[in-house]
Image (cartoon, grey):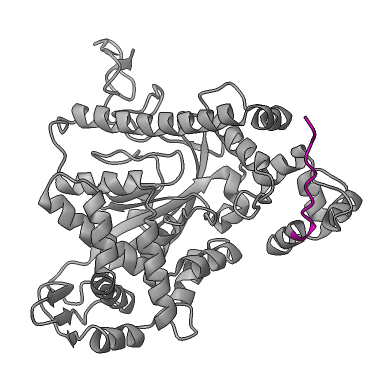
């Protein structure tokens, strides 16, 4: 079988420019000499299969395989699948390239099977946890919608692209549409009358009268988001309704909740348009405060949007995101990583997000390790959302955002962490009910799938031993 010669000098130079590398640093990252890299960039030498795999591995978000040859892309996907902790160790790059080249159909099926295996495992964990908590008989509408977003990978392409196109009309040369532009479009293009007045809700819309009331006591970022929600639900109604129609949810309440959720999704996509937001997030190394300043959004809105950047061909860093209230309940959750959240009850008490709830307006960072041996960098911040009046209690909660350690160079909050240290990582789990660790001092109750032994004459941290 003759090898195909792949010349990609222009693509390599662009990759180096985007990654802000000099030739020496780029060459070191790829494990080659600077003179060899210079030859590659000038199309004097072709890319080898080994280099294709290394580029896909080292620059998964920036490197695009030349259209003439997709072996490296398939090998990278195969490498990610075989790196699952299920297997003893990942396969070497040469083996992955050989399999992708000689057996591409088999490699594609293996990657597809691994993805199905991972998703099936997630579904089984949901079912096990639901049965353990006596909630397996039926899912509530909000649980059904939450799971729908999870298995859509929290990225809804037609809605996201429609919101991005609308933002381009309204942004007027800025990062994203301002309040004035949104108000003008509501009044002019959609014939909506707008009033800021104190009522019993954040937003109230009378569809028959085309009248919108917004609570003026909201912070400016929240007022802008509520306006964007209403604009999206009206201007993108057809796109949102089409997604709801194909979701096959069981109840009318679930379908209505999904419409609301998709309108919120569209509002975030309108205020933080995909390509511009993804570019700036990478440039700022996902510094939430700086991103929020640039796009005029809240800390929470910015974190949530980062967890949705999963567009094919232009993916962002795979993040997990969640919001936890004062009682430890997870009220929002999504993970584009292999970390999965408990669906019922609270999260692991060792996770730093719980400490963040008690310390508003301070960012905490944690290196955590899950029972499967994977390590994550978590950033958490406690937030207080003002009520706008004395007789209403402000809402207090914390948000967390994190990624696997392989993306540490993209995540500013990883700076200063010793990622290689065994002692530096906090050993966390999803929740006590499904965590297999038998040596945790913070365990609240035993795992549901293992027996316990009770010795009346011995007492440890908990009054039982896990079998």
Residue 136: image x %, image y %? 17, 31
- Looking at the image, residue 187 lies above or below residue 338: below
Tell me: 344 left or right of 51.
left
Count all numbered tags in the image, as a single digit.
Answer: 0
Tell me which residue sits at (17%, 53%) in the image. Answer: 255
From the viewer's side, name the closer residue of 429 and 466: 429
Q: Examine the rendering and report whether any part of residue 130 can be seen.
A: yes
Report the magenta residues as a range: 1-10
Which quadrant holds the C terminus? top left
Residue at (21%, 44%) from the top-left corner? 144
Residue at 61 percent of width and 42 percent of height: 419
Main SS class of the magenta portion in the image: loop
Quarter of the image for residue 463 reads top left
Residue, far front: 1
Please state if 6 lies on the left or on the right of 408 as rendered.
right
Asked if the magenta segment contains residue 120, the reply would be no
Q: Residue at x 48, y 82 (%)?
A: 174
Residue 150: image location, x then y, percent: 33, 45
Is residue 204 left or right of 274 when viewed as pictured? left
Magenta run includes residue 8: yes
């Amino acid at each position: 079988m003759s090898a195909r010669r792949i010349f990609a000098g222009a693509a390599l130079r662009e990759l180096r420019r985007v990654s802000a590398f000099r030739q020496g640093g780029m060459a070191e990252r790829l494990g080659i000499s600077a003179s060899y890299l210079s030859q590659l960039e000038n199309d004097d030498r072709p890319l080898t299969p080994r280099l294709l795999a290394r580029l896909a591995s080292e620059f998964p978000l920036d490197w695009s395989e030349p259209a003439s040859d997709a072996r490296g892309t398939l090998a990278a996907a195969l490498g990610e699948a075989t790196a699952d902790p299920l297997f003893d160790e990942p396969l070497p790059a040469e083996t992955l390239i050989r399999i992708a080249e000689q057996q591409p159909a088999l490699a594609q099926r293996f990657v597809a099977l691994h993805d199905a295996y991972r998703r099936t495992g997630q579904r089984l964990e949901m079912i096990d946890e639901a049965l353990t908590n006596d909630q397996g008989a039926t899912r509530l509408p909000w649980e059904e919608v939450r799971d729908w977003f999870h298995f859509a990978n929290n990225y809804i392409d037609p809605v996201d692209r429609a919101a991005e196109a609308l933002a381009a009309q309204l942004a007027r040369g800025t990062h994203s549409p301002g309040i004035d532009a949104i108000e003008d479009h509501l009044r002019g293009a959609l014939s909506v009358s707008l009033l800021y007045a104190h009522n019993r809700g954040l937003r109230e819309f009378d569809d028959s009268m085309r009248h919108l009331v917004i609570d003026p006591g909201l912070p400016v970022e929240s007022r802008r988001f509520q306006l964007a929600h209403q604009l999206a639900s009206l201007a993108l109604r057809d796109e949102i309704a089409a997604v709801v129609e194909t979701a096959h949810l069981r109840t009318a309440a679930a379908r209505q909740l999904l419409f609301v959720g998709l309108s919120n999704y569209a509002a975030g996509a309108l205020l933080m348009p995909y390509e511009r937001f993804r570019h700036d997030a990478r440039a700022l190394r996902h510094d939430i405060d700086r991103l929020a300043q640039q796009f005029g959004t809240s800390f929470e809105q910015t974190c949530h949007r980062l967890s949705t950047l999963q567009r094919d061909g232009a993916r962002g860093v795979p993040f997990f995101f969640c919001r936890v209230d004062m009682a430890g309940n997870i009220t929002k959750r999504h993970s584009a990583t292999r970390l999965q959240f408990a669906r019922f009850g609270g999260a692991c008490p060792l996770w730093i997000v719980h400490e963040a709830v008690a310390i508003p307006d301070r960012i905490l960072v944690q290196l955590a390790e899950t029972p499967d041996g994977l390590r994550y960098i978590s950033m958490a911040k406690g937030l207080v959302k003002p009520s706008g009046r004395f007789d209403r209690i402000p809402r207090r909660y914390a948000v967390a955002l994190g990624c696997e350690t392989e993306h540490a160079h993209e995540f500013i909050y990883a700076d200063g962490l010793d990622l290689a240290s065994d002692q530096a990582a906090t050993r966390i789990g999803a929740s006590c009910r499904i965590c297999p660790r038998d040596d945790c001092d913070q365990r609240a109750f035993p795992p549901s799938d293992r027996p316990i032994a009770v010795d009346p004459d011995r007492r440890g941290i908990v009054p039982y031993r896990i079998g």
